[in-house]
Amino acid sequence: MAIGPIPVGNAGPLLDVRNLVKHFPGRRRGLFGAPSAIRAVDDVGFTLSRGETLGVVGESGSGKTTLARTLLRLHPATSGQAFFDGEDILTADPAALKRLRRRMQVVFQDPYLAFNPRFTIGETIAEAWRIHFDALPRSQWAKRIGELLEQVGLRADYAGRHPHEFSGGQRQRVGIARALALEPDLVICDEPVSALDVSVQAQVVNLLVDIQKMRKLSLIFVAHDLAVVRHISTRVAVMYLGKIVEIGPTDAVFERANHPYTQALLSAVPVPDPRGREQRRRIVLQGDPPNPASPPSGCRFRTRCWKAQDICAREEPALLDRRGTGTLSRCLFPEAGPTTRLPHGQLTRGQE
């Protein structure tokens, strides 16, 4: 039986994603064969509460960025549902989608590529109000631009400068200011610090933490750096080959990871304390991730998993809380694994 939309209002989650699928056409099989499908996102589901931050992690090609872009309708979904405050983003008509996008904003990985180089910073921020013309009277634009720049740690008189006059960290702050211009309920951050120097990463992440608490924003934070994700996230979702293989509260995932892929990721996180490095077991995965156009049968991680058994090739594990820890995982043989021993909220070396 199909599940209907969640009630609109404060009773339900802000975002409710169900069975989301995004396939891209691949190479044609033979001269007359049908093209294969690259399964970038395959049956993904989760909820996001108001004021919550969900970190999405995984190696390159796991589907993190595709998930973020599909939720924003920058990529059309193949199937599934994504309810934002009770309204399905994926089936919304243009007028409804414009209304929803006013409440859903994005911070891109490289803000320089996301800016029009001919626009000043002030014009870049004001572009949101040109599109949503009823959001703010034009007479208030200059004042609000200055307030937003100061809120992200920049001077108000920077509004007349162009993007090339700023450093990478400053441009990313402008990107955050632009995302906040429409007072959104949800901001999706797609690798917002991966292009920045390590010392600047902590500044931008701490800025996002402060803004999130002050505005009670919901965040989806896509990243590679697990220490950064732990610092900012309420919950963590780990993706592998288009699927969420583990999701749960941040501390539970980092301290009692159930899925072997999560355990392998955590074992690679740099540890500042030399004694911590000696106490943990480093897990080195063999081989590369399988082709997303032809994933393995059963468990998708089994071809690189040291615990794989014959049943793993026949049965695809469901996303369940198998050990009663509050963490859902796709593994038939879950067990608490090695952790990074990182204190809660501590960033990697050089980020203090």
Image (cartoon, helix red, strand yellow):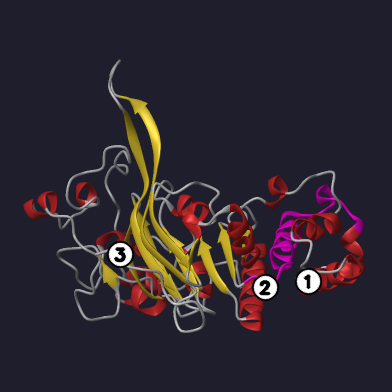
Question: In the picture, residue 264 is in which quadrant?
Answer: bottom left
SS for dot 1:
loop
Question: Which is more N-terminal, label 2 or label 1?
Answer: 1
Per the rendering, the mark at residue 263 is 3
Residue 321 appears anywhere in the view: yes
Per the rendering, the mark at residue 71 is none
Quadrant for the N terminus, please.
bottom left
Q: In x, y percent, where is residue 100?
A: 59, 63
Q: Label 2 belongs to which residue?
A: 207
Q: Main secondary structure of the magenta part?
A: helix
Q: In x, y percent, where is residue 239?
A: 37, 57
Stretch of the chain drawn in magenta: 160-184
Q: Are marks 1 and 2 in contact (CB under 8 Å)?
A: yes
Mark 2 vs mark 3: in front: 2
Quadrant for the C terminus, please.
bottom right
Question: Which is more N-terminal, label 1 or label 3?
Answer: 1
Q: In x, y percent, where is residue 324?
A: 22, 81
Front-most of 31 and 9?
9
How far is the residue under mark 1 from the one under mark 2? 8 Å
Q: In the image, 347: left or right of 25?
A: right
Q: Residue at x 47, y 55 (%)?
A: 90
Q: Residue at x 47, y 71 (%)?
A: 86
SS for dot 2:
helix
Amino acid at the residue labelled 1: Gly
Per the rendering, the mark at residue 153 is 1
Amino acid at the residue labelled 2: Leu
How far is the residue under mark 2 from the one under mark 3? 29 Å
> Is 247 inside the magenta-drawn segment?
no
Front-most of 321 and 69?
69
Amino acid at the residue labelled 3: Gln
Question: In the picture, residue 93 is in which quadrant?
Answer: bottom right
Q: In x, y percent, where is residue 163?
A: 81, 50
